[in-house]
Amino acid sequence: MSPLQNILDTQTRPGKLFKSLDDDNLLCTACGHLCKLRPGQRGVCKVRFNSDGTLLVPWHYVAGLQNDPIEKKPFFHALPGSRALSFGMLGCDFRCAYCQNWFTSQSLKDDASTISSTSVSAKDICDRANDAKVVVSTYNEPLITSEWAVEVFKEAKQRKLWTAYVSNGHGTPEVLEYIGPWLDLMKIDLKSFSPKEYRRLGGNLDAVLETIQTVHGMGIWLELVTLLIPDYNDSDEELSKIAEFIARVSKDIPWHVTAFHPDYKMTDRKRTPVETLLRAYQHGKNAGLSFVYAGNLPGKVQNTENTYCPYCQQLLIERVGFRVVSNHLKEDHCPECRKSIPGRWVKSS
Ligand code: SF4
């Protein structure tokens, strides 16, 4: 066992997201893998394990903590221009070859990662909020560390902060029911529309699609991201399938189509060109989506970083990258036609 694993195993406590099976076996329900764990066995994520019939889960630590623009998460329809206190732990239930957070997500599976953890309380984390309005579980996959995230969110709620997950969406009904009462916003990656590719990433497309539908139905504000990788998920057929699926759930869900850069184990292809982002944008519009955004190439993607009123086309929010240049919304409505714009634009308290 690695020294990091030894340390993390001490930063645990009994979890809540499981079902008891015969002979001290457990079924973990924190993510779509639904691992059946014999005593002594670890899950696919490596951070949850069966210790003599008790499921131990991550607790009271962080591996990353910083204040970011909320647009970086990315949330474009939630408190524009505000700061988001981002905290992350270690581990993931996926193994994406192109992961841009692999240092944290793959730390227990890849010796090249030298990151470590720091013991903290929920109060310690929230004390760092300063002017942030939202506390976000991100950097690693938050679903697998949900008990600890909810503990942090309880503290955040006492301080009237909003809460968010930045997730791969590989959820279960149990984990969504557990986090739902504490969660205001969720960003989910819809990485592909191919069941085979999802299996290669280490997950299940159906579990992600069901999570997207459930989260939207629960009234949690949801934004979706597809990282467009040349010759991987950027065909017209795949982009139109993704866009049409989102439109069937709701045309009001923002879809961010973002540019890839070679990273981690996927270094055999080029950066995503502007034309691909604009093509994906058009697929979103053809499917009837009201809000499609091209990301990661600030200032180079025509006007696709801005928000326009879907009813009268008035410019509502002008952006360059993560920076809000101007915001013309009147609370939650268009200043021109006065229709309400989907989002969580203002906090009441
Ligand atoms: S979080 Fe997912 S991968 Fe980890 S033990 Fe639970 S079901 Fe398995």
Image: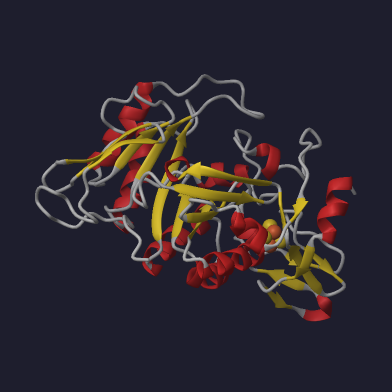
Does 12 sit left or right of 146 as displayed?
right
**In the picture shown, does residue 52 fall above or below 305?**
below
* Along the viewing direction, whichever of 296 and 124 lies nearer the viewer: 124
Place of residue 138 in the rendered image (x, y in percent of width and height, measured from the top left): 58, 49
Residue 233 or 28: which is nearer the viewer? 28
Q: Above or below — where is 95 with respect to 252?
A: above
Residue 174 place in picture, x, y as percent: 56, 72
Q: Is residue 2 visible?
A: no
Q: Quadrant of residue 50?
A: bottom right
Image position of 219 with respect to 238: above or below: below
Q: Is 333 on the left or on the right of 266, as rendered?
A: left
Residue 348 location, x and y as percent?
33, 65
Which residue is at a point 41% across and 21% down the rendered structure image?
273
Residue 55 location, quadrant: bottom right
- Camera-nearest residue between 235 and 179: 179
Q: Can you say which quadrant of the picture contains the C terminus?
A: bottom left
Point 31% across, 41% down: residue: 292
Can residue 74 be seen in this snapshot?
yes
Q: Is residue 58 left or right of residue 294?
A: right
Q: Is residue 343 left or right of residue 166?
A: left
